[in-house]
Image (cartoon, helix red, strand yellow):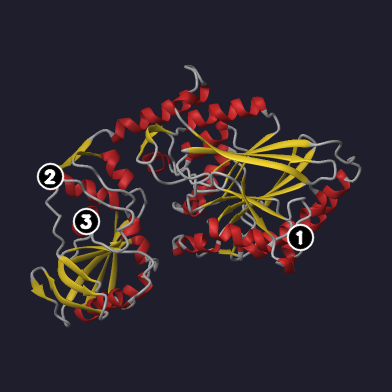
Amino acid sequence: MKALHKRILPILLLFATAFAATPPLAGDTSVTLLHSNDTHAHIMPFDSKAYGPETGGIARRANLIRKLKAQTPYALVLDAGDIFQGTPFYSIFKGEACHKLAVAAGYEAVTIGNHELDNSLENLQTQVANSGIRLLCCNVFYRDSKRPIFPGYQIFLRNGLKIAVIGSIGNEAWEVIDRKIRAPLFQTDQTTAVRQVAQRLRKYVDLIVVLSHAGIEFDEQMAAQIAEIDVIIGGHTHEEILEPRLIHNNPEIGVCNNGLDGTIVVQAGEHGTFLGKLDLLIDDNGQISNYNGQLIKITSEHEPPPGDQLLELVSRYNHQLEQQMGTVAGFTDKDLSLTKDLKKTHILTMGTFTAQSMLEAGKGDICVVNSGAIKTGIEAGEITIGEIYEALPYDNTVVTFTMSGKDVQAMFDFICSNKTPPDGYQYAGMNAELDMVKGQAKNILIGGQPLDAEKKYRVSTSSFMANGNIDGDKLFAKVESVEDSGVFMRDAAINYLGRVKTVPDYSRSAVNIIRD
């Protein structure tokens, strides 16, 4: 890190010299921050359970941004990460559509979310280069050279104000990225890294804004611990913060000399449902004399006029997508449920369907897959390719281990004894009682026969778990061989539907979870 500091210092000294003659601000000065987070490839308007049909849409958001910038020409447009992943727009275009449309919408800086790395650092770098998007992150480096992967910050001039925007990813968000992808990289503690950059920049700029993909709880902690930050624009936990929160600094770290004695924290929900707007007023002493924030819901009233260039670009991407996604893959008589509040603790029909299709793709005897690999359920009726892509968006392949019956028993016993699991699991190919009270798996039947400690079994899972994530390093600690099918989970589901045509009734789970 010392070498990195030596490279940054001359840049800061040059920057300081360039602005040394800048006169003090005369009178109150206004600046507006327009912000979003966790848009997750929601390019088109979508039906929201909370906000009704035809919510959001990047073309509408872009039109609103243009209108707001016409009213407040000194606005700065920012995003706090996870622009990637969540709909077929990402699965098919690997981030190309997400980034190019964000640039066309007027975004001037974004930070890295955990899902930006879903298809490797190389893919992210390709999309950044092709789109020209400005991605900032001060706390992720190459493991071998210790060089930063992306610029840590950018300084913008707005209405005479010098605004430093620092990008960062939180510690917990970093840990959920696939271990294999993280292997050639390393992340430093977010608070420490942001503090170092903010302290260096503070005397050269009028405002410091941090883009933080860490979650609201962590953002509030960081706000209290760093006196040099004026605003934190957050993401990762999809919080709808309707009014900005002012977090006062801890007494022992000093006071932020911005007129507020603290840091403003904002976050704008998820999926582009809202655009956040934070208005700041800076007095002639360089302090924030007033601030006001809101979340503006993106609705049909923000629809751009026909012929709008960005709308036409969206239409071209959507047309390519619809040609592939509208095909019917199969049918289900009942909803394949995946209730968000239950998927970490219960076996759900969408989970069983997914696990069964993986079992067949991996030619396994049983399948264990983490619930987080499945994003959503599917309603009764025809199942389209697009619905499968939306439910299983990640590029995880089906991996199959060969394990002894003894080690399979130990795997399920571990699941039963782990009181704080990082995720729930879904199963196929077995009957069992998973006793979470006694920490033991009982009455395990595989293929209708009792588990044999000496027999060899094929256990299918996702490549994400096979790489050691979600306790995969513990569940599959003792294996005799490994086989990666190369088949994506979503393709396994499509192939399974091609065989069975109609999804069997999975409403009665063959695995009984005992909790009390």
* Identity, as a three-letter code, of the amino acid under mark 3: Ala
Residue 476 seen by the camera:
no
Cα separation, mark 3 vs mark 1, equals 59 Å
Q: Closer to the camera, 226 or 212?
A: 226
Query: In this image, 306 relative to 354: left or right?
Result: right
Sequence-first disc among 3 and 1: 1
The numbered mark, 2 or 1, whose residue comes first in the sequence reads 1
Say what secondary structure mark 3 lies in. helix
Instruction: Check disc 1 and give the amino acid type.
Output: Val
- Compared with 469, 56 (above or below) is above
Q: Which mark is first along the chain, 2 or 3?
A: 3
The residue at the far top in this view is: 306
Looking at the rendered structure, which numbered label has been put on residue 361?
3
- Drawn side of residue 483 relative to residue 4, left or right: left
Please tell me how crowded label 3 is: few (under 14), some (14-19), or many (20+) other residues with Cα within 10 Å.
many
Locate residue 326 relative to residue 157 in the image: left or right.
Answer: left
Residue 40, x across and y down, in percent = 45, 44
Residue kind at label 2, given as amino acid type? Thr
The numbered mark at residue 502 is 2
Residue at 22% x, 46% y is 494
Local secondary structure at mark 1: loop
Distance between the alpha carbons at the discs numbered 2 and 1: 64 Å
- How many numbered discs, if any? 3
365 or 294: nearer the eye? 294
The picture places residue 499, in percent across and down from the top left corner, at 13, 47
